[in-house]
Image (cartoon, rainbow, N blue to C red):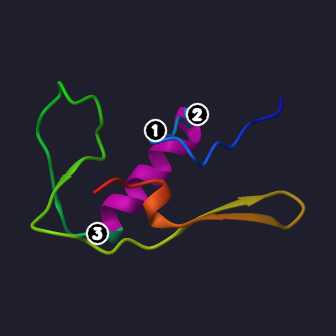
Amino acid sequence: GGMIIESGTTVTILDEAAYYPLKDTIQAAIDLTPVDDSSVGLDLCYQTLGKVSFPSLTFKFKGGVDYELPADKFFIQ
């Protein structure tokens, strides 16, 4: 089992075992109201008033390898 990280796309797809803990961590870290619109298909879509600053996201892999994504690579404003 390998994987591909494509940081240039606007949608990130993760295995559920990784996605749900990440989602819970993001929701706990930010104080924004989720958009209640299931037709959007994105459950990490938030309502904001203007630009919001998000922290970067670091994937930690076995062997001590870290891959850091700046917020503009995983959140669109």
Q: CA distance from mark 2 to mark 3?
A: 22 Å
- CB under 8 Å between callouts 1 and 3? no
Say what secondary structure mark 1 lies in. loop
Say what secondary structure mark 3 lies in. loop
The amino acid beneath tag 3 is: Ile
Q: Is residue 18 magenta?
A: yes
The magenta stretch spans which residues?
A: 16-28
Q: Is residue 45 above or below residue 30?
A: above
Q: Nearer the viewer, mark 2 or mark 1?
A: 1
Task: Please name the predominant secondary structure of the magenta segment in the image.
Answer: helix
The residue carrying mark 2 is 15
The residue carrying mark 1 is 11
Which quadrant holds the N terminus? top right
The residue carrying mark 3 is 30
Residue appearing at x 51%, y 70% in the figure: 56
Q: Is residue 17 above or below residue 41?
A: below
Residue appearing at x 60%, y 49% in the figure: 7
In the figure, is residue 35 to the left or right of 44? left
The amino acid beneath tag 1 is: Val
Q: Is residue 7 above or below residue 68?
A: above
Towards the viewer: 8 or 35: 8
The amino acid beneath tag 2 is: Asp
Provide residue 50's location: percent of width, then percent of height.
14, 69
